[in-house]
Structure formats: structure tokens, C-alpha cells
Amino acid sequence: MLYIHRLMDLNPKSAEIETTPILRRLRERCRFPLTEQQLAEDFPEYFVSETDQKLIMQAIELLPDVMRRVSSFSETYAEPRNIQRAHSLLQEIQEPLQKSKAYVDDLRAWHNGCLPALVTLLNSIRQLRTQEEKVRVNDELNMIFVRLLGTDRFAFSHPVVNEGHVIRTNDLAESMGKGVLFRVTLEEEIKKMPWDQIQLRIPKEHLQEAEELRQRILQIKKGIDCAYNCNMRTIALSILLYTYVKWVKTG
């Protein structure tokens, strides 16, 4: 997408702008009536995969143990404030990650077999004659957009993983590689000693435990990133479908 780079960027105006190059391409390539093969060339790249589901599920399964291990991290060497921040972040992402899992499961269920129904629905648009028929088809389309976006008003409204969760999880993963869980002495702070020097005074077993936590947080990050990417692909899918509707109506 050219102008939509975040979930919050989606609105009726940005959606209309995004349709312009797609509509041009459809006018050059597509013929009416549409076929399932034509849609199969465009839609599946935005579909949720089994791998997406697995990555999100793995993150959900890892969270309770990682939260427990962060909370019980070495009292002797830990920085309590950073321990609390890390735990709070992990706790914060639990619910949206679980809702993301339910969301992608629903998307995948719809993706499996949606193309024949979409072809029939899109091809019916030019055949509509009565107001009753137009209302029925419009309601069917609105139901699809509500399923994809959480609303029929071209905004992303599902309470799932968002930009904030992605940024904060990424920050935590990066800071874990710099010893964020460990207490820094006053002398080390004054001298602005780098982590590779500070870690020399810390017992290996505590460093190993911190590294194991970092690896698990990186795995959780994969699930968070995956959930967010599914959201963005679904926005792109919604715009693609909207463009097909415009093309069928206007030619």
C-alpha cells in the first residue's frame, strides 16, 4: 500500500486513494463476468496462513512462563523497576494477542472457500434491478467488511495487536540484549560503562538465564509481528475487495 502504513491510517479518504492504481490495473486486465481464477490471482497473497496461526499461538503459550521467570529473576542482580516494566508489558500484550488469535482463526475460516462466494456476489452487482436487491447485496458486502475490519466505515476497529504493542515488544527485545534486567552500580553509571564490561561481574548462570528469557521474548515478538502483519494484510485485502466493487459498478 502506498499511503496506509499503520492501522490508524485507514479511513475512507486513504482507502479511496489506495484504490486508484488498483482500479487502473483491473481495467486493463479484468473482463466481466469475473471468474474465480481472476480473483485467485489477487486475493490469496493477503490471506492468513497456518504458519501465521502457529506463530501467534506459540507466543500465547510462551507468555505465562516468561512472565513468571521475569518476576522471579535474580533479586541479587536485578533492577526491580525494569523487571516490573518488562512484566507489565508482557501482561499488557496477553489479551490483544489472544484476540488476534481468535481474529486470524476467523479470517482463515472465511478465506477457505470465500472466492466462489465473492465471484457470485461481485457478478450480481451489474444485474441488480430493484431497490430490494441492491439493499440485500449491499448488506452482504457490509457484513464482509465488518468481518474484516470490525466496522463497515473503512477503519480498523478490531481490539487486537496494534503498533504500540509491536514497538514496545521490539524495544524490550532490544533492551534485553543490553542487560536491561540487571542492576547498574553507581560507578558503572557515572563511568557510562558499556554492557559488555558490566556483564563481566555477573555470574554466568544469571547471564544464561537472561539470554534464555531474551530468546523466548524474541519468539513472542515473532508472534506479535505476525499478528500485526495479518492486520495490515487484511486492510490491503479490504481495499482490494472495495476496488473490485468499484470496478464492477463503473467498468
Image: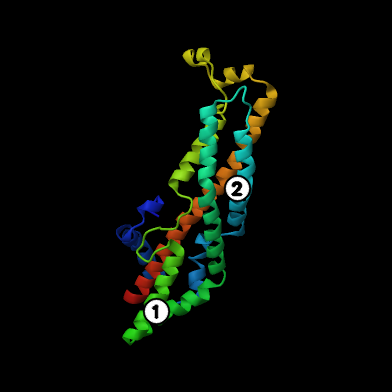
Residue for badge 1: 137
Residue type marked 2: Ala
Left or right: residue 20 versus residue 78 is left
Say which of 117 and 80 sits in front.
80
Relative side of 190 to 131, left or right: right
Which secondary structure, mark 2? Answer: helix
> In front: mark 1 or mark 2?
2
Label 1: which secondary element: helix
| Residue found at the far bottom of this picture | 130
- Quadrant for the N terminus, please: bottom left
Q: Residue at x 56, y 62 (%)?
A: 105
Q: Is residue 56 visible?
A: yes
Name the residue rendered at 57%, 30% in the picture.
177
* Cα distance between the residues tagged 1 and 2: 39 Å
Residue at 58%, 59% in the rendered image: 49
User: Residue 164: x percent and y percent?
Assistant: 44, 44
Q: Nearer the viewer, residue 109 or 240?
A: 109
Point out residue 8 in the picture as x, y percentages from the top left corner: 37, 52
Q: Is residue 31 visible?
A: no
Tags 1 and 2 in contact by the CB under 8 Å rule? no
Q: How many marks?
A: 2
Residue that numbered label 2 is attached to: 59
User: Is 78 above or below relative to 153?
Assistant: above
Residue 133: x and y in percent read 37, 84
Q: Looking at the image, which is closer to me, 103 or 194?
A: 103
- Judge whether 5 appears above or below 242 on screen: above
Q: Quadrant of the C terminus?
A: bottom left
Which is more N-terminal, label 2 or label 1? 2
Horizontally, is 220 left or right of 250 in the view? Answer: right
Q: Amino acid type of disc 1?
A: Val
